[in-house]
Amino acid sequence: MDAAEKLFATQGYGAVSLRQVIAEAEVNVAAVHYHFGSKEELLDQVVMRRAGPVNQERMARLDKVEAETGGRPEVEQVLDAFLAPMGEVATRNPQFSRMMGRLQAEGILSQVVTRNFQPVLGRFMLAVRKCVPHLAENEFRWRVHFMQGAIAYTMGSDPAPVSGVVDDGYPARLARLVVFLGAGLRAPEQGAKKSGKNK
């Protein structure tokens, strides 16, 4: 899994064959097929060995926030419960973050998420939805779409060469992102001021 993570991070999932992973890891072909079956299954296990503990921490933080607020947290509290554990694992494993960024760029990440993250994502999306009842369902889905892109870009790219910002690490990046996303999710719907809604 270490070899697969390294190759997927540096070359991309699509460009790497299972044979390359086997050669990099210097392991037996039969053993790899026995334990992982396919390259897709290997990818899922590479992702989940890091993301599994992250998801457990996310759920624990959301439980705590909901208990402390009587089930009525602010959207930023929900976002922080979801994003902060990502910053911690990315700090310890920057190669994993690069790999996830590669998967997003290749258009594969959504498939990985669908296969492995649904219970956690479902709960968090319900929690976020409760925080923004003023949004119509279609508008909420658009904002979730924008949120997913912002998270992937924040985690998978190095901002300093392009924007000249001082990058003070993943936790600080994600703390800024929580503020940004919270404001975007709470904003009135497009055209609401013109039509007199949400006054």
Image (cartoon, rainbow, N blue to C red):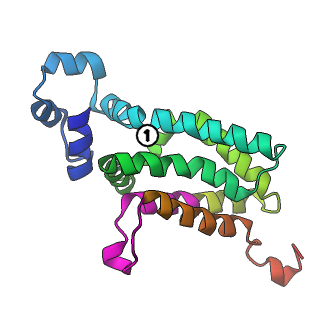
Q: What residue is shown with label 1? A: 112
Which quadrant of the figure contains the N terminus?
top left
Which residue reaches farthest bottom?
194
- Residue 104 lies in the magenta stretch: no
Secondary structure that dominates the magenta span: helix
Identify the residue shown where x is 28% and y is 27%.
38
Please determine whether, in this image, residue 149 is positioned above or below residue 50.
below
Q: Is residue 115 visible?
A: no
Identify the residue shown where x is 39% and y is 74%.
166
Callout 1 crowding tier (Cα within 10 Å): few <14, some 14–19, many ≥20 = some
User: For the magenta stretch, what is the residue range?
Assistant: 146-169
Type of amino acid at the residue the image marks with label 1: Val
- In front here: 27 or 139? 27
Which quadrant of the figure contains the C terminus?
bottom right
- Residue 160 lies in the magenta stretch: yes
Left or right: residue 145 compared with residue 51: right
- Element on which disc 1 rests: helix
Please determine whether, in this image, residue 55 is positioned above or below residue 98.
above
Q: Is residue 8 visible?
A: yes
Identify the residue shown where x is 45% and y is 48%.
88
Q: Position of residue 68 (x, y in %)?
A: 78, 44
- In front here: 23 or 168? 168
- In front here: 187 or 59? 59
Q: Position of residue 61 (x, y in %)?
A: 64, 41
Q: Position of residue 173 (x, y in %)?
A: 48, 64
Q: Quadrant of residue 41?
A: top left
Left or right: residue 126 compared with residue 6: right
